Image: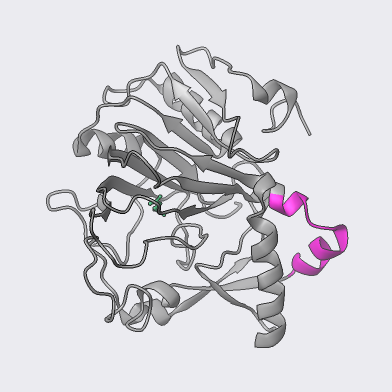
Amino acid sequence: MTANEPGSEAARGAYAPMVGMTVTPASGDGVGSQACGAAVRGVRLDQPLAAAQIAAIRAAWLRHQVLAFPDQAMTLDDLELFAQTLGPFGVDPYFRSVPGHPHVAQIRRDAHETSTLFAESWHSDWSFLAEPPACTVLYGNVIPPVGGDTLFANQYAAWDGLSASMQRRLMPLRGVHSARRGYSRQGAYGENDKGRSMAIRYDDSALATELHPIARVHPETGRTALFVSPGYTIGIDGMPDDEATALLAELFRHQAQDAYVYRHRWSEGMLVMWDNRSIVHAATGGYQGYDRLLHRITVGGPARSA
Ligand code: SIN
């Protein structure tokens, strides 16, 4: 481990990347010993950012994988401008966007909604695409007083935590990714999904599959991350289904163990950005009777090593 890696001594305390920002690694309850996450203060995201600030945010994001910026006051226009400093807009194949904001989707659940929780399975956003997005930006507008945390699991640590023989076994393998469990006609958000406040659009295109390396080399850090998830990985290329199901079940258990998990508690006006290439995440419930509303933008960018 180098001095700059999450989990190192240097990474544990707050540090200032020289542009008035402080970056404080997550710690305390709900933060595993090899987790991820940091809070960033001292920067206003509703104002134009200097190149040095953007560079410092990107560096902190690559290092901590999940950044939370509390106490921001952002409109959807601000959110779009900030997202564009990180990379090009990504695509959101199964969300209907907010009118007038074609790249913004609502993550929403109304107080008395009884539909299943959205995004409760561990996943990396849209990993079933040929070019999965690098980053997701999520801004909290209405946050319930209890529940609704988001869990993030560090997949560099998950890869590093596998035995050498398991790493050798996985190295040549490719996962089969698909949106079918969620977004096909028969999927969780398909034609039988009633009473959901979120604007989800199911489609037969969700039956398609894409292959991605299970040992995925991050194109910007060069580190290897475990790249599978119960949300979107439905098989292993060239492997019989029963063998693949057993191996994936083992990886799914491994990747989400407490040591790798950062439980993120939201507050209103908080922006969170995460690196889909090195973490998986999952929504949690526990806020029945309260509204929850966040706005999300998917950001494209380097998905593969050059
Ligand atoms: C998401 O996966 O985009 C939503 C996470 C959450 O609602 O906590």
Q: Find residue 26 and report its horizontal and vertical position in percent.
A: 57, 30
Query: What is the total number of numbered labels drawn onto the structure image?
Result: 0
Furthest-left residue in this view: 100
Q: Is residue 21 above or below residue 293?
A: above
Does residue 60 show up magenta in the picture?
no
Q: Is residue 92 left or right of residue 41?
A: left
Magenta segment, prevailing SS (helix, strand or loop):
helix
Q: Find residue 131 and report its horizontal and vertical position in percent.
A: 47, 61
Q: In this view, does 130 lie above or below 149?
A: below
Furthest-right residue in this view: 165
Q: Residue 223: tell me if it is visible.
A: no
Q: Find residue 195 and report its horizontal and vertical position in percent.
A: 21, 69
Q: Find residue 40 and report its horizontal and vertical position in percent.
A: 46, 24
Residue 133 picture quarter: bottom left
Residue 271 picture quarter: top left
Question: 156 or 194, which is in the foreground?
Answer: 194
Colour scheme used in the picture? one colour
Furthest-front residue in this view: 289
Question: 248 or 305, which is in the foreground?
Answer: 248
Q: Is residue 121 left or right of residue 197?
A: right
Residue range in magenta is 158-172
Q: In this view, does 247 lie to the left or right of 51?
A: right
Q: Residue at x 40, y 42 (%)?
A: 87
Q: Which residue is drawn at 40% across and 28% down?
A: 69
Q: Residue 300: tell me if it is visible.
A: yes
| Quadrant of the rendering where the N terminus is positioned | top right
Q: In this view, does 169 lie to the left or right of 51?
A: right
Residue 118 picture quarter: bottom left
